Every structure is written in structure tokens, then in C-alpha cells.
Amino acid sequence: MVSPALPVDVPPQPWTGRFDGDGVEHRRWWQAVTPFTPPTLTPPADPAAAGTGQRPAVILGFGSDAGVRRNKGRTGAAAAPAAIRAALGPLAFHLSRDVLDAGDVTVAGDALEAGQARAGLAITRLLDAGRLPVVLGGGHETAFASYLGVAGSAAVREGLTVGVLNLDAHFDLRDESVPSSGTPFLQMARAEAAAGRELRYAVVGISEPNNTRALFGTAEELGVDYLLDEDCSAEAAQTFVAEFLAQVDALYLTIDLDVLPASVAPGVSAPAAYGVPLPVISAVCRQVAASGKLLHLDIAELNPEFDIDGRTAKVAARLVNTLLG
């Protein structure tokens, strides 16, 4: 029976991978990850300051196709959490932090908003207990579930300034009557305004041909900082991220895998014709991890149905490994 302390729909499943031995020197992810159990969820002494630093990481899957379907994209991202876990399992485990697996929140049919609310509640509880939630989406509707969790956390309640950094080819600021994978950051902006706050939102990797003038106009109105994919040299990206990090106390990082070139990440809803090189994205991830400001992270838009040799899943796994290292 799954404890009501964390509203997941699917409990943690066994991890698998290559076996080289039982010693620490042989350990791989599948041997290191342990099931998350609510008795381990002990709040820290200072909830407001618990959002950053070297915390135990808790993996939470968000199995959703509803947002991509509503956005008329290629569905299949609901299978992504299992695919990323399968790619992580065989990797050698060099991390100095504990990693636990809390299972999955799944979206049945078109019940997106209910699934986002459940995932948001789970994320809030993890954050308030001093854990680092690592959400494996799902389409990029995953981002609004993450926002609900972050916005409800002690970090925000106690006044920390939280920035949202999106590695993505798209702004995802669509103004639609029905929320989808294309609307989460406009939803965030409106929710923040309703709460008397301003969304601090920056994007690395924007593809100019894949965002309309209307979307650029919305980004300008909201004060969104962005870096175009064609301008994403390693130096430019790291300077951009450093300037954004300097403006915030804590960071929610979201990675849409379609920020990468289609040759690197073919298994996504919208493969990129240009994209940002993997070494640049990896360097940004290392920079964010080293900042000590990482509050929450998610990775979205893996579509195993269209992947080639598990290539995109392996890239997703490598980025998660980098961010937790």
C-alpha cells in the first residue's frame, strides 16, 4: 500500500543494471538508489533555507501525454520516466549524496490538472523536508506541476526569490484556453501575478524560427531573459546563466530535451533542426549544480517511441547524473 504522505500512483519499482560486484568501488545507480519511504521525510530545522545545498535527491516520475496531446505534438512522453530510470541504472555511481525513488504520478487520459496538482503536492512535501526533487517527465506540462510544488514550498512562503531557468527551444508561453505543454510558463506568470509576485524566467536555446512574433512579444511583456540557440557558445551561455543566478536566491531548473540537436536527442515531441550542443548544455548543468542554488529540477519531453538506440534517454540520464554530482 502506498502511503498517503506522498500522493504517487505507482510505487517505486526495482532498478536493474550491470553487476560488477557488491563493493562501493563497483556500485552503479541501480545498486545505489533506494525506495523512498515517508518515515525518512523529516523536515529540516530551517525550512526556509532547506532549498539549496547538498541534499538527498528524490526521483519522482510524472507520466503524462495529456499536455503534448493538447498541444498537437507527438505523444509518448508518458513512458519517459521508466526509460530514463532504465538509462540511469547501469551508470557508475560516483555521487556523494543519497538518491531515493518515490515512484510515479501518472495522468490518466486527459486529467492533466488533477495530475499536476498531485505531483505539485508531492514536490512541496519533498522540498519542505529538505530533499531535492528530481522530476522525470512527461511532456513539458511537467513544468507547471513543478511550479505548483515550488510555489507551495516553505522556500517561497518564507520569502526566497526563486528563478526559473528553462533549457528549451521554445518559450512555452502560448495563450490558450486549455493548458498544454505549450502554456506552462504563461500559467506560471499569471499565478505569480495573482500571488503578488513577478515570475523571474530565463530561457537558454530559443529557436527563432520555432517561436512566433506573438510569443516573442509575450516574452518581452513579461521581461523574460533569453539566449537564442545560434548564440549559445559555451562562454555566452555560462555568462547568461551566471547573470541570472546572481538575481535569485534559489533556482528551479527545467530541461526540455528538444533544446538539443535532433542528432543528439531524436526522441522528443519536436526534434530540433539546429539545437544547442550537448557540451554547452552539460556545462550549464555543472554551473547550476556548483552554484548551490538548485532548489528543484525536472527533465521533460523524452519520447521513447521515437528514440534511436535509447540515445535521448541516455542523454537525459547523463544530465541528471551531472546535476546531482
Image (spheres, rainbow, N blue to C red):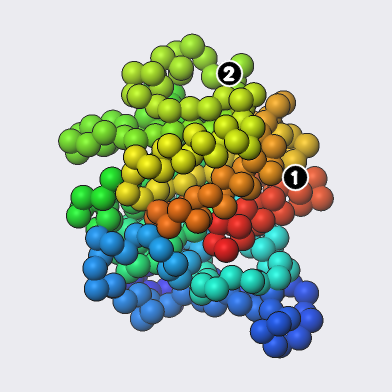
Q: In this view, does 34 lie to the left or right of 161?
A: right
Number of marks in the rendered image: 2
Mark-to-mark CA distance, 2 and 1: 25 Å
Name the one closer to the observer, 189 or 111: 189
Q: Which mark is residue 307?
A: 1
Q: Nearer the viewer, mark 2 or mark 1?
A: 2
Circle nearer the N terminus (2, 1): 2
Residue 242 at x, y percent in the picture: 46, 41
Badge 2 marks a residue whose secondary structure is: helix
Residue 184 at x, y percent in the picture: 41, 35
Residue depicted at 81% across the width and 50% down the height: 309
Q: Of all residues shown, which one is farthest toward the top?
A: 213
| Label 2 environment density (alpha carbons within 10 Å; few <14, some 14–19, many ≥20) | some
Q: What's the residue type where badge 2 is placed?
A: Glu
**Residue carrying label 2:** 208
Residue 69 at x, y percent in the picture: 55, 34
Quarter-of-image position of residue 30? bottom right
- Looking at the image, can residue 199 be seen? yes
